């Protein structure tokens, strides 16, 4: 009797709905799901009242969410802090630009760009992560190593000015970056304006749903077990290095998704996307929202990107200072994150 | 002791930490279905011996054979997958998870064996009725029991326990001893590193005494505790500590 009970009680691979409602994210009451559904509905109808320019701006606030969710998985759920997610963002964007830019006439050129971009991010993470995790590098060194990766990449890309750095017919462009990157196409539909907006909303929702199921499924629980007690997890028979590498590659691929959306948005990419300022931002979004809640991270990433955009387009040169001050305030007064703290107060139950 | 048919055999295990010799040539053999207690004064090398067996430390010399296989160079998770279950001195169940999630995480650590011992332990420790509780809500002794159940979840051939009754009341200790004795009678090999003499008296068929990183004495509880030299190095310390 007890084995059957034990199997029934534990979350199994069956049933997406059950996984989605598992204990490892905020917002599990019917009321919370209703709020989420209403939120999604308002994103879906928003373009009805908005200009294409406004819709594209909102898509810009959304497009970093996959990268932030990946960092939430890696750091909040897995206990491994990466300061270098922007490196994978940049690799996907650049590789997409090179591949799609060299195949302007092929109908599948941009899609080959997507596959290569994500593949390049995942491959870089697999190689880099292999050395980090299989060498059992101490946890506190990982943020430094990943930051160095991002800064090296930024420096290297900055040196790629001139004709010798032209791949096929696409110049990498040094500090000025790569311009004229083609937008995704299906037949005659080009993902710009409203189509880009809906693409972004769809990708963000898919990433969120997928990760929420992941953290409540077995692989996610193993990740949390490693965060809580690495040695204990290993002594239950888990190859901790492999589990951490898997999460690292997944998080890097999600950063690549954001990089791909970014080059759709502006059709350009520069080395500054993987520079010091940008490298710090995902950590801020995740920490301010509440790193061990995917939903909190998604909401906070959207709001902070909007805040940054509004502040800097209003000519306020203190945008970064304000975001930084917000981080300090959150760490002092709501260390679990603003959104998580507010959600707990509202719903009075999380776990 | 002897031992063509030993399930676990350690030969000449040595481990130094800088100038400190934590283990010098430990020889140890354990049969299937045997329940063994490893005792010794503080600093005798019990913890080092335990971590050499489960692979947290690698020996400087010597080898460990488990179930006919040389496991000296295997990593901890590989040893667990071959059929070694273990618990630590301190509570290390996952507090953020429920009892059921803890057991599920333990179940999926690798290929599963026969879970008859797990079922016995889960029922005997009364945890079957508490599957939905968060582990953080369990009292100390039930957390220790949960960890024993987790170690048994995948049907190991050998259970290694490091002070499983630390912090338990006499009644809880006695119940732990009862359950472990029953598991050994069912054919499970168990090695327990323990301080609690009442527990050792209740469970042990054979007792191994470690002293200064080597096996000092081995035999039945009565034999070992009757020896003057054992009383001097070990039991004397216990009485002083208790006084």
Image: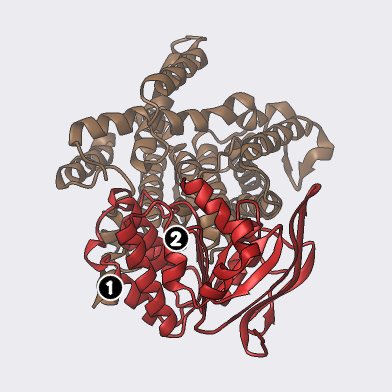
Q: Is residue A30 visible?
A: yes
Mark 2, mark 1: which one is toward the viewer? Answer: 2
From the viewer's perspective, tell me whether residue A50 is left or right of residue A65: left
Q: CA distance from mark 2 to mark 1?
A: 18 Å
Q: Looking at the figure, which quarter contains the N terminus of chain A?
A: bottom left
User: In the rendered image, which quarter is residue A327 located in?
Assistant: top left
Chain letter behind tag 1: B
Picture coordinates of residue A238, whole percent (x, y): 54, 64
Toward which corner of the image does residue A142 lie, by quadrant? top right
How crowded pointer 1 is (Cα within 10 Å; few <14, some 14-19, many 20+) is rated as some
Q: Residue furthest left?
A: A31
Residue B5 position (above or below residue A281):
below
A173 left or right of A327 in image: right
Q: Is residue B72 above or below residue A348?
A: below
Chain on which label 2 sits: B
**Who comes first in sequence, dot 2 or dot 1?**
1
Across and down, in percent, residue A39 comes to 24, 38
Name the residue at 44% across, 72% down.
Answer: B203
Which residue has dot 2 on it? B164
In the image, which lettered chain appears red?
Answer: B
Q: Which residue is mark 1?
A: B123
Q: Is residue B217 left or right of residue B128?
A: right
Element assignment for label 1: helix
Q: Is residue A124 left or right of residue B235?
A: right
**Which residue is the extreme one toward the bottom?**
B4
> What colour has chain A?
brown
The structure residue drawn at horizontal position 81% and vertical position 32%, both measured from the top left corner, is A162
Give the percent coordinates (x, y) of residue B44. 65, 56
Residue A62 in which image quadrant: top left
Judge whether A66 appears above or below B236 on screen: above
């Amino acid at each position: 009797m007890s084995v059957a009970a034990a199997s029934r009680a534990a979350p199994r691979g069956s049933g997406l709905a059950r996984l989605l409602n598992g204990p490892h994210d905020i917002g599990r009451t019917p009321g919370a799901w209703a709020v989420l559904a209403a939120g999604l509905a308002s994103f879906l109808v928003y373009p009805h009242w908005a200009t294409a320019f406004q819709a594209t701006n909102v898509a810009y606030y959304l497009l970093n969410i996959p990268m932030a969710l990946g960092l939430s998985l890696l750091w909040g759920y897995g206990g491994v802090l990466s300061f270098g997610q922007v490196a994978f963002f940049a690799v996907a964007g650049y590789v997409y630009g090179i591949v799609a830019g060299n195949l302007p006439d092929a109908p599948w050129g941009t899609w080959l760009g997507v596959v290569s971009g994500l593949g390049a991010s995942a491959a870089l993470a697999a190689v880099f992560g292999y050395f980090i995790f299989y060498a059992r590098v101490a946890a506190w060194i990982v943020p430094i190593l990943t930051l160095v990766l991002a800064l090296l990449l930024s420096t290297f890309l900055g040196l790629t000015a001139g004709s010798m750095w032209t791949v096929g017919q696409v110049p990498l462009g040094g500090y000025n970056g790569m311009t004229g990157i083609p937008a995704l196409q299906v037949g005659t539909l080009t993902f710009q304006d409203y189509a880009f907006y809906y693409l972004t909303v769809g990708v963000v929702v898919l990433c969120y749903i997928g990760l929420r199921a992941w953290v409540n499924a077995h692989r996610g629980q193993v990740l949390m077990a490693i965060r809580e007690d690495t040695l204990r997890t290993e002594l239950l028979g888990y190859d901790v290095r492999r589990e951490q590498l898997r999460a690292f590659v997944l998080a890097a691929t999600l950063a690549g998704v954001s990089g791909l959306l970014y080059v759709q948005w502006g059709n350009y990419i520069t080395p500054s996307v993987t520079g010091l300022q940008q490298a710090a931002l995902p950590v801020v979004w995740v920490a301010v929202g509440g790193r061990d809640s995917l939903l909190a991270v998604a909401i906070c990433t959207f709001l902070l990107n909007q805040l940054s955009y509004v502040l800097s387009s209003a000519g306020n040169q203190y945008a970064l200072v304000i975001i930084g001050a917000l981080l300090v305030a959150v760490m002092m007064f709501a260390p679990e994150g603003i959104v998580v703290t507010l959600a707990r107060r509202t719903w009075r139950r999380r776990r | 002791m002897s031992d063509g048919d030993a399930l676990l055999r350690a030969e000449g295990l040595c481990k130094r930490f800088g100038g400190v010799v934590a283990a010098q040539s430990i020889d140890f053999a354990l049969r299937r279905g045997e329940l063994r207690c490893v005792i010794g004064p503080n600093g005798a090398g019990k913890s080092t011996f335990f971590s050499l067996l489960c692979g947290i430390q690698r020996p400087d010399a010597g080898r460990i054979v488990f179930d006919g296989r040389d496991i000296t160079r295997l990593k901890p998770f590989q040893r667990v997958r071959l059929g070694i279950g273990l618990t630590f001195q301190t509570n290390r169940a996952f507090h953020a998870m429920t009892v059921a999630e803890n057991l599920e995480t333990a179940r999926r650590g690798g290929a599963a064996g026969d879970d008859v011992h797990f079922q016995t332990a889960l029922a005997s420790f009364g945890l079957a009725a508490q599957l939905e509780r968060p582990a953080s809500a369990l009292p100390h002794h039930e957390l220790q029991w949960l960890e024993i159940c987790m170690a048994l979840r995948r049907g190991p051939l050998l259970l290694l326990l490091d002070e499983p009754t630390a912090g338990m009341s006499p009644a809880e200790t006695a119940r732990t001893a009862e359950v472990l004795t029953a598991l050994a009678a069912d054919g499970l090999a168990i090695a327990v590193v323990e301080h609690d003499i009442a527990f050792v008296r209740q469970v042990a068929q054979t007792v191994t005494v470690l002293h200064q990183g080597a096996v000092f004495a081995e035999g039945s509880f009565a034999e070992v505790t009757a020896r003057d030299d054992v009383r001097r190095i070990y039991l004397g310390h216990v009485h002083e500590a208790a006084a």
